[in-house]
Image: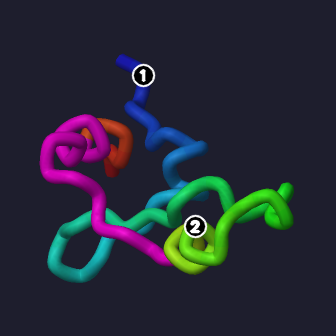
């Protein structure tokens, strides 16, 4: 049987914390910033903890 591999796109975008939670950066912070409000730009760059409802699918992507 072939080895299971981690999802390479997820490896680049999502990090696993020491306690086992997943952290990712919010979207919409790369370009077209002149059209976005100050609040949207301020909150857009933060790293957030992934919603618990998505954790199971992320665990399947991070097979090791």
Where is residue 39 shown, x and y percent of the image?
55, 74
Q: Give left or right: position of 2 versus 20.
A: right
Residue in view at x 19 percent, y 69 percent: 20
Q: Give left or right: position of 45 versus 63.
A: right
Lower sequence index among marks 1 and 2 = 1
Mark 1 Cα shell of 10 Å, populated few (<14), some (14-19), many (≥20)? few
Residue 61 lies in quadrant: top left
* Cα separation between marks 1 and 2: 44 Å
Front of the two marks 1 and 2: 2
Q: Give left or right: position of 27 versus 31.
A: left
Residue in view at x 59 percent, y 55 percent: 27
Does the CB distance between marks 1 and 2 fall below 8 Å? no
Q: Is residue 50 magenta?
A: yes
Where is residue 53 shown, x and y percent of the image?
15, 42
Q: Which residue is mark 2?
A: 40
Q: Which residue is mark 1?
A: 2
- Secondary structure found at label 1: loop
Q: Is residue 52 above or below residue 60?
A: below
Q: Nearer the viewer, residue 30 or 41?
A: 41
| Quadrant that contains the N terminus | top left
Residue 63 lies in quadrant: top left
Q: Is residue 48 magenta?
A: yes
Q: Which mark is drawn over residue 53?
A: none
Mark 2 Cα shell of 10 Å, populated few (<14), some (14-19), many (≥20)? few
Q: Give left or right: position of 2 versus 44.
A: left
Q: The magenta stretch spans which residues? A: 46-59
Q: Nearer the viewer, residue 10 or 52?
A: 52
């Amino acid at each position: 049987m072939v080895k299971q591999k981690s999802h390479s796109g997820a490896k680049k975008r999502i990090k696993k914390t020491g306690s086992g939670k997943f952290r990712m950066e919010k979207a919409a912070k790369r370009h077209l910033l002149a059209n976005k409000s100050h609040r949207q730009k301020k909150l857009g760059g933060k790293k957030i903890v992934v919603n618990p409802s998505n954790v199971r699918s992320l665990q399947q992507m991070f097979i090791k």
